[in-house]
Image (tube, rainbow, N blue to C red):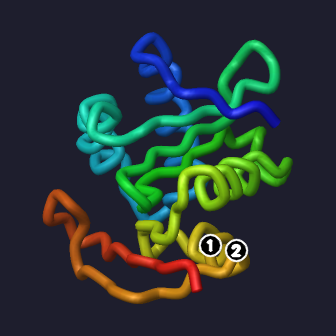
Amino acid sequence: MKISIAAETDYEELVTIWEASVRATHSFLPEEEILYFKPFVKQYFDSVDLYLVRPDNRISGFLGMSGHEVQMLFLRPDARGKGIGRSLMEFAINDRGATRVEVNEQNEQAVGFYQHLGFKVCDRSEVDYLGKPYPILSMELI
């Protein structure tokens, strides 16, 4: 699976994927919180290295890294279960040296996915980066 560096021209599509993915996997977030976070997503893209997978004419998923830490992994809902997330994470680990990941504790499927890849919880924050009451787990590859 070919993984490419995201360009600024991809940002609108990435925000659309982010929103669809969050709606599919973050049932703990009420609508007003999704709308609150949405404007920050595009701004956040400039602070991470962004990689994407485009198996056809549209992006199926993307990964954001800072140093050796995966800070975001989002897939189109119809791309889940097709190995895209695993491919992005294997790229992050094998090609980019990822050893840590940040994940919402309440996103149990994601936590399980990362555990299956060998990550273990090493730290927990009661709040997210904006001080909202959505605990964040820091996980390390063991």
The quarter of the picture where the N terminus appears is top right
Q: Say what secondary structure mark 1 lies in.
A: helix
- Compared across the picture, whether 88 is left or right of 31 comes to right
The reply to whether callout 1 and callout 2 are in contact (CB within 8 Å) is: yes
Given the image, on which type of amino acid does mark 1 rest? Tyr
Residue lying at the far left in this picture: please name it.
131
Quadrant where the image shows the C terminus: bottom right
Q: Position of residue 135 (x, y in %)?
A: 32, 76
Q: Position of residue 5 (x, y in %)?
A: 54, 27
Q: Residues within 10 Å of mark 2 (few under 14, many from 20)?
A: some
Mark 1, residue position: 114
Residue beneath label 2, please? 117
Q: Position of residue 7 (x, y in %)?
A: 46, 18
Closer-to-camera residue (38/114): 114
Q: Image height check: is 47 above or below 5?
A: below
Q: Identify the residue shown where x is 75% and y is 13%.
A: 57
Q: For the point 77% across and 39% down, which residue is it?
A: 78
